[in-house]
Image (tube, rainbow, N blue to C red):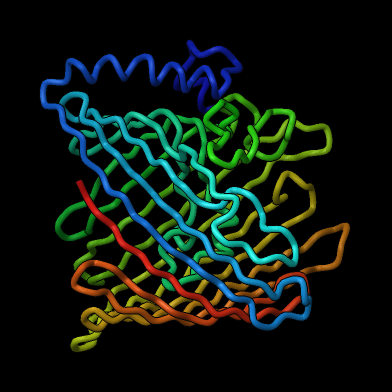
Amino acid sequence: MLAAACFPSLPPRWSGFSLSLLVGAFLLPMSAHAESGGVHGEVAIEFHSDWTTNSDDPANERGDTNIKIEAGIEAELASNLKLKSLAIVEPVLDPAEGEDRFFDDEGLYLQEFFAEYEGKTFAVRAGKFGQKFGVAWDSAPGIWGTDFAEDYEMAEQIGVAADLRFGSKDSGAHVFTVGTFFADTSFLSQSALTNRGRTRKSDGGPGNTEDFSSFSVALEGGKIPAVTGLHYHLAYIYRDAEGADETAETGLAAAVSIKVPAGAVALVPLIEYVALNDTGGTRGTDVRYLTTSLGAEYGKWNVALSRTARETASTDAADVNDSLFQVSAGYVFDTGIGVNVGWRQAREEGVDSDALGLLVDYAVQF
């Protein structure tokens, strides 16, 4: 496999626990000797409250109020070498059926912890981080624009990846990325405050192999003079599986967005298509996602519309067509606090639900 070719000295199986300890043991002492040290980062806080006002299933008619905090920190260890981490506080358990939730189930966990060496035309990172696969789970606008797309966010993986940057003034800026990885099964897969449980290899699932038999490839870019404001993303992922009744999952992602100035208004349409085959390691179960969205900014005001269609086809069950539509609007005050309100309509497994929502966010850099 790819890992064997690139890292022939690695043993055939290396647990996430061992790799995490290696990264920490190797890098942390280096920080004391960094010639050009420094620590900086950002803390982003979101207060989110949803009220499902109408649903075909009365158990869905409830409120859900929570807070999410993301703290990203970078420590410069040496010239071009950084240690990066991302700690998150958010609900880590599903809410109780039919009950309101008010700041319950909040847990703290480390989503990213890795070292990155960055040169002029390349970068290499190792540790715990997410794979490049799709963009809508992060960049679709609106209060709920990312909800369905988060299904295929490939976060919390132990791996090694490399970026190769290329391009020119005439062709734009492009990045080719290749990585090999497996699901984090170390103690870092748990959470504090509320424990979500530790991921074990025995849990199964694609990518949960504790060896480098899964890989991803991505090509993305922008700053193309001929199409100002365009950004594209193409990716392929292969997640191996070892369970007796499981098979490998493969996926393709393609996305394009463009920022279009229209007088004092900036429009950003986005479209993304993702195809997952043998989803979740289940043979014959394929899922397709199509996200279309439009974000608009006018000064400190913003409006977002988005729709995601999710189609699940299985050889052993009837097809399921889900969809999520949302519209939201917001304003950013001089203090940096943003306030957004919106409406969400979703169909999941044949159940239609409507919800109203409020999102207040704020970020500070240090």
Residue in front for this viewpoint, 330 or 165: 330
Residue that protrudes farthest toward the bottom in the picture: 263
Q: Nearer the viewer, residue 321 or 340?
A: 340
Q: Residue furthest left?
A: 36
Residue 12 position in % (x across, y down): 60, 15
Tell me the quadrant of the picture where the N terminus can be found. top right
Q: Classify residue 328 as left or right of residue 279.
A: left
Q: Toward the viewer: 294 or 364?
A: 364
Q: What residue appears at the point 33 percent right and 39 percent down from the top-left corner?
A: 163
Left or right of 161? Residue 145 is right
Residue 123, position as x, y percentages in the image? 29, 35
94 in relation to 122, above or below: below
The image quarter containing residue 27 is: top left
Above/below status of 365 relative to 305 = above
Residue visible at 35% across and 45% down in the picture: 71
- Asked if 108 appears above or below 338 in the picture, the reply is above
With respect to residue 151, does 344 lie above or below?
below
Q: Position of residue 31 (x, y in %)?
A: 23, 20
* Residue depicted at x 51% and y 44%: 155
Q: Residue furthest right?
A: 316
Residue at (24%, 79%) from the top-left corner?
300
